[in-house]
Amino acid sequence: MKKIILTLVFSVLIIGCKSKSATNSQVDNKTERVIKGNWQITAVNYPGSDVIKVTSFDLADSKCFVGSNWKFVSNNNKGNFALNSPSCTAYSTPITWFINKEGQFVMKILDEAKAKKVKSGYVLNVANVTETSFQLVDKINVGGKLTDVVYQFEKLN
C-alpha cells in the first residue's frame, strides 16, 4: 500500500512539473481564423534600427521583410511568404504555423523539407490583432538587453 501511494505521489509530481513548451500547447483557433488570408509586412520597427542590423528569421536583413507577402491558411496551418524588395535577394518558402493559447505565433520554415523533419522554428508574440492588421513581436538580445522587433502586418484584398 505504501508503494502505491508513493508511486501516485511521484506520478503527480512528474506530471505537475512537466515543462510547457510553445509547441505542446493547445491552439488558439479564434486568432488563427482572424489572420488567415493574404498579408503584407508594412513595417519592421525596433529601437536603434538606424544603426543596428537585425537578421530576421536567420534569412535576411529585417528591412528586406518590408513589402513581403505572407499567406496563412488556418484550416491546415500551412502557408508561405515571399521577400520581394528590389534591394534584396528574392526569396520564397512554404511554412507551417499555428498560434498557441499563450498568444505565441509558432512557425517553421520548410524550404525543401517536410515539417516533421524541420527541428527548429520561431516563436513570436502576437499583438494588436484586428480584421485588417496585426503584429508579430520577436525578442532579440542587443548588448545583453532584450529588445522587441515588431513586424506590422496589413491585410491584402
Image (cartoon, grey):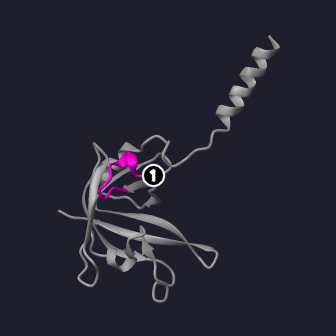
Structural crowding at the residue carrying mark 1, measured as other residues with C-alpha within 10 Å and reported as few (<14), some (14–19) or many (≥20): few
Q: Residue furthest bottom?
A: 51
150, above or below 74, in the image: below
Residue in the foreground of this view, choosing between 152 and 11: 11
Residue 32, how many percent across, how many down? 34, 49
Residue in the foreground of this view, choosing between 128 and 61: 61
| Main SS of residues in magenta | loop
127, above or below 27, in the image: below
User: Label 1, on which residue?
Assistant: 119
Dividing the picture into quadrants, the one containing residue 12 is top right
Residue in the foreground of this view, choosing between 58 and 122: 58
Residue 118, how many percent across, how many down? 40, 52
Residue 42, how many percent across, how many down? 31, 74
Is 114 one of the magenta-colored residues?
yes
Q: Residue furthest left?
A: 157
Q: Secondary structure at mark 1?
A: loop
Residue type for callout 1: Lys
Q: Quadrant of the N terminus?
A: top right
Residue at 28% across, 43% down: 76
Q: On the picture, is 138 further left or further right than 153? A: right
Q: Quadrant of the C terminus?
A: bottom left
Q: Which contiguous range is marked in magenta?
A: 109-118
Q: Residue furthest top?
A: 1
Residue at 39% across, 78% down: 61
Dividing the picture into quadrants, the one containing residue 58 is bottom left
Residue 31, how many percent across, how many down? 37, 49
